[in-house]
Amino acid sequence: MRVVTEEQMREIDRVAIHERGIPSLDLMERAGTACADVITELHAPKTAAVCAGKGNNAGDGFVVARLLSERGVKVELFLSIPPEELRGDALANFGRLPAGVKQTLDPEAEAFRLIGSEADVIVDALLGTGVKGLVRGPMAEMIRRINEVESSPVVAVDIPSGLSDENLAAGGECVHAGVTVTFGLPKRPMVIHPGAEFVGQLVVDDIGFPEDLLCDEALDLNLTVQGEVLDMLPERPEDSHKGTFGHLLIIAGSAGMGGAAAMTAQAAVRSGVGLVTVAVPRACLSCIETHVLSAVKRPLGSKSSDHLDESALDQLGDLLDSVNAVVLGPGIGLAPKTKRLVHALLERVSVPLIIDADGLNALEGETDRLRRRHAPTILTPHPKEMSRLSGSEVQVIQSDRIAAARGFASEIGVTLVLKGARSVIADPGGDVWINPTGNTGLAKGGSGDVLTGLIGGLAAQGLPATQAAIAGVFWHGLAADVALEQLPPQVMVPDDVIGALGEALRQLAE
């Protein structure tokens, strides 16, 4: 699903109304209807408090108030500005309000504080996407009062009021919605942090915008959705066998880090791949033998049994040419000889290569080696690893994760997964996907190894690099969400996420 900036959504509005001839009042009516339908379905309220400002967002709210009233809901409208300041479509829909909708001019939000919080549902129609700077005055006061209510669910019309980068950066007030019904497409501040924390459940309704405007290829930011991921996953024909689903080679591990290799392999064998081979230094062999029964083990000797070195190239031999994808890096350490092995494998591996953890750290200052690869490459850094790869400070990366991921992926020619809350996936062509699944239970060592195994297994099954990354990140986060149904995030460990992969896939298929 495409995601738009405020400017892009305004352009879609303009083209739909002024070039395609869709009356703006019709769009407002559909928007209010979509919101009223969601409120009715989710909350079946007997009473509703609608909080409105003066722009088109207020106009949408007036439609909601009218429709709920017509459905038998007792509606009270709290206005932050005098009705005489209304203009255009908002004024037209204010004039359509039935007599049954009680209207209260409430710039100080005092009336709402006293009686609005008793409503079965609160509708936020104060501010839309055009917020500039810090929200002040009556709007800020009403937002503050809405957020003080704990007993009533809040439904935001199009976007939670105050949700803009400028307002949040200035410490301004923003509505904490339980549900947001947005129109056309999701807006960028809604799908990334910190804005995503205010949205609650996101419902998207196209309200009749022309489909070509919503699917325009010039819109290069996307929100990963369940149906898209399901379509990416490989089919499993009845007459298939293990050779049908590919062979993944995992090169991982060093002394004390056998667990990283084991978790990567455990996740990989759950991905649906036909065969997994784990190549590790002999110091890790017992860990892999104990924890990953269904993978082939390939112990690699070196002058030190603690870590891998360039002799692994000869020991792996033709296996590097017979597999369908290679995972490199989990737990391999930073010994100088191991770094040289990583550099050599970049040149030697001619199939999709997924690089994580110390495999990434071995590329600090060496990203030109990635540019010279001809086969697809997937990198999965967390922000600190991204800092080492790109040379940018962590704070700069985190301040605009989309730009950081897109810029690096395009410049170096890789698929990049910038991990973190709302992980960002960028492809070499400049398209970006925001992942909506996952929770703080993933903030544990080893979670990245699980993700790498999943992505590697999907790539080995033939998914193009970017699709393997998108699907792997979504599935991984969904498994954590499934695990969260049984476990608090504090006690969740990567093994719990691996154990939840099956139920997550079942839910995905439903």
Image (spheres, rainbow, N blue to C red):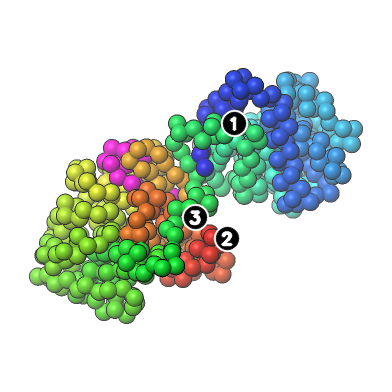
Residue 489 is left or right of residue 415, and the answer is: right
- Compared with 297, 331 (above or below) is above
Q: Which mark is residue 210?
A: 1
Q: Residues within 10 Å of mark 3 (few under 14, many from 20)?
A: some
x and y percent of residue 438 in the render?
49, 57
Disc 2 to disc 3: CB gap under 8 Å: no
Residue 417 appears in the picture as rendered: no
Disc 3 to disc 1: CB gap under 8 Å: no
* Quarter of the image with the C terminus in it: bottom right
In percent of the image, x 79 and y 27: which residue is there?
94
Disc 3/disc 1 C-alpha distance (Å): 25 Å
- Name of the residue lying farthest toward the front: 239
In what element is the residue under mark 1? Answer: loop
The residue beneath circle 2 is: 510
Q: Residues within 10 Å of mark 2 (few under 14, many from 20)?
A: few
In percent of the image, x 50 and y 44: which residue is there?
223
Q: Is residue 303 magenta?
A: no
Residue type highlighted by circle 2: Glu
In what element is the residue under mark 3? Answer: helix
x and y percent of residue 205 in the render?
64, 40
Looking at the rendering, the stretch of residues picked out in magenta corresponds to 406-423
Q: Residues within 10 Å of mark 1 (few under 14, many from 20)?
A: some
Q: Which mark is residue 230?
A: 3
Residue 322 is left or right of residue 135, and the answer is: left
Judging depth in this view, the residue of 440 and 407 nearest the camera is: 407
In what element is the residue under mark 2? Answer: loop
Disc 2/disc 3 C-alpha distance (Å): 10 Å
Judging depth in this view, the residue of 251 and 405 nearest the camera is: 251
Residue 56 is left or right of residue 281, and the answer is: right
x and y percent of residue 442 in the render?
45, 60
Chain-order first, disc 3 or disc 1: 1
Residue type highlighted by circle 3: Leu
